[in-house]
Amino acid sequence: MYLGIDAGASATKALIVDRKGKVVSYAIVPSGINFKVSSQKALEKVLKSSGLSLKEICYAVSTGYGRALVKAEAHSSEIICVSRGIHKLLPSVRTIIDVGGQDSKAIRIDEYGRVLNFAMNDKCAAGTGRFLEVMSNLIGKSINELSRLHHKSSKPIRISSTCTVFAESEVISHISQGSKIEDVIAGLHQAIAGRIFNMSSRIGFEKDVAFTGGVAKNEGFVAALSKKTGLTPLLPEEPQTVCALGAALAAIRKYEESISHAHL
Amino acid sequence: MSLPRRRSRILQTTRKIGELIMTYFSKVSDAKSKGKPVAWVTVFTPVELLYALDIYPVAPEHFGALCSARGFIVDYLEEAERCGYSESLCSYSRCSLGYVLSGMNGIMPPPDILITFRNSCDVYVKWWQSLHMHLGTPLFVGETPYVLAPEDLDNYVLDYVVKQLEQLIEMAEERFGLRFDMEKLVEVLKLSDKASELWFETLKLRRFRPCPLGGRDSASDIFPLVVMQGTEEAVSFYEELLREVKGRIGRKEGVIEDEKFRLLFDGIWIWHAFDLIKYFEDKGAVFVYEPYSEAWAYRLDASEPLESIARKILSMGLNVDIDIRIERFLENIKQYQIDGAVFFSNRSCKTWSATQLVTADILNKKVNVPYLLFEADMADPRQYSEAQIKNRIDAFIEVLSES
Ligand SMILES: Nc1ncnc2c1ncn2[C@@H]1O[C@H](COP(=O)(O)OP(=O)(O)O)[C@@H](O)[C@H]1O
Ligand code: SF4
């Protein structure tokens, strides 16, 4: 069995595959402030749900923001892992739009899943899941509710600030002027979709396009980004673990390499 | 088995730059105390002309880079911001304004004259006017029209700039009671041209595999071409540098032992995070070409002194049509066998950054060169996210390994 651990800025994902690359089990836990702790937790959880013991894991690869802090035989960047992961799940994909907790990226891959080019958001939280989290706190609706309420909106508000802090005060003033909460939510989704669209336009949208990362589980955001790009995206069953899957697949490859080296 | 001895990657000659800079500043201070005028100039101003007039130039842009690299720029930046200069202004300008506003207690001596030519950016004009406002020192602002084809300059453009050079000479003679000496200018131009020739020759040697001179060298080694053009010291520095680089080539010795990727860097270097270059090198990637390094050298023709200087300030890289810049990129990607391009989008320098996305895209489509584009500020360390940038570099290196 092979393990991939994606220590993301907001969530740590652990995923186990068998020798053929089939997903056995996965776990998602909050990253908190200590990647060592969160990766340990994610590992325990995934072992428990799969009924495996640590001894049965031949090789582990870590990825994500905290990858260097996680115990693993090797690590790899998220760009490569997301690409490998999506290629395994949806081989027709050529463009990936990945929106996570603290960064978003657009990646172009070829028919073998190799990375051709990529673009990432710059430093600030404006085009990421963090933006939606700040806003969901502000308006007192959970992340799940954001997704649900989006579709009730008939007249989304327009957020013009690119800065999260300024956008916050815009939202407050819209609410105090009596805007409906669903219109605010739809407006927020449109705002982040707009930013991600601009970033991704740098590399183009060759089909098929897939959305990945935790934020791809937010239906409101997916609807807004689909509308903005005019695309019908492919969505993996669990968008948040694609990167961990890529890491687990890398673990298989690295393990096989190490074996063949050992036999030389 | 004995442990492999790690070779130093930075050239011995490069290591002398720090001392050269200090000597240069103390020379300027000495000259000032002896009553010689000091000019604050923007880079790509005719420094040669000033040396011929016995005026000592210092460049606040260089001072900004220096303060950033040595880690004491933030006080100056904050001083300027406290006095109302916007954080989105070029950090070089904020640095020197903060320096002036906080009393000029550093190595850069106060100016007796402020000189700029608007060739790199429009910031120059307002920046120099602000310095003038605070200091009250005489100000000379020269205008250089935007150039489409530097090899094919219209006569009226050239005349226009020559006329301004003459005005500058007149102003200096009047203000400081100096005598302009054409013969001296010719001598200075010959030295300046020699230094440029040597530097061009050295840069060309980076085409060799493994590359003998890396980003940390080229970033430092330009200094004598910034404010010492036309001096004997500059010429002997570049002679020594060329000798050392040739030696490395003879021994097939590269910046890094196992050269995997040859990269181009577009932008001004990030002075406060200079170690990023080493971060690339540790991953087997070496910088072999930068428009920034080339920008400082220019071949002058001493038989046409003023025309030649005018051509030089008109042909400055940022004053030239984008298509020509892209052509140069494409040519050099071939010449230097470049595997990938790193574009540093600089918050300070809009004039440089504005064209980068288009350029990167064309390179990617035409010659299939993968690129990395990241944002930071060349001198202001407060808008810098190291972890995030390193994360991208890691991903970029992996992408290069795949192709
Ligand atoms: N069911 C969900 N609906 C909407 N958003 C979600 C959901 N689950 C997670 N998210 C969001 O996804 C983000 C985390 O995504 P992830 O890809 O794990 O990021 P990272 O790898 O940067 O930690 C968080 O901002 C979180 O709010
Ligand atoms: S804006 Fe750019 S060209 Fe102008 S002074 Fe600043 S760094 Fe130099």
Image: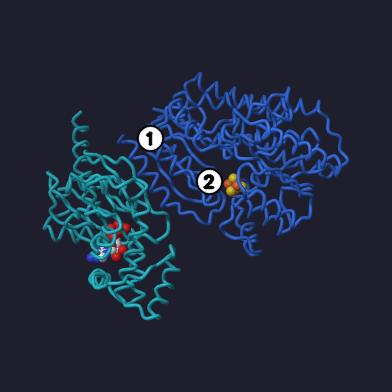
**Three-letter amino acid code at disc 2?**
Ile
Which class describes the residues within 10 Å of circle 2: few (<14), some (14-19), or many (20+)? many
Q: Quadrant of the C terminus of chain B?
A: top left
Image quadrant where residue A40 sits: bottom left
Chain under disc 1:
B
Q: Name which residue lies at 59% across and 53% down.
A: B91
Q: Position of residue A32 (x, y in %)?
A: 33, 64
Among the two numbered marks 2 and 1 on one chain, the one whose residue lies closer to the N terminus: 2
Tell me if B70 is positioned left or right of A203 in this view.
Answer: right
Question: Element type at marker 2?
Answer: loop
Is residue A22 visible in the rendered structure shown here?
yes
Q: Position of residue B184 (x, y in %)?
A: 80, 28
- On screen, residue A251 above or below B213: below
- Residue under label 2, please give it: B270
Q: Name which residue lies at 37% across and 44% down.
A: B394
Which class describes the residues within 10 Å of circle 1: few (<14), some (14-19), or many (20+)? many
Q: Quadrant of the N terminus of chain B?
A: top left
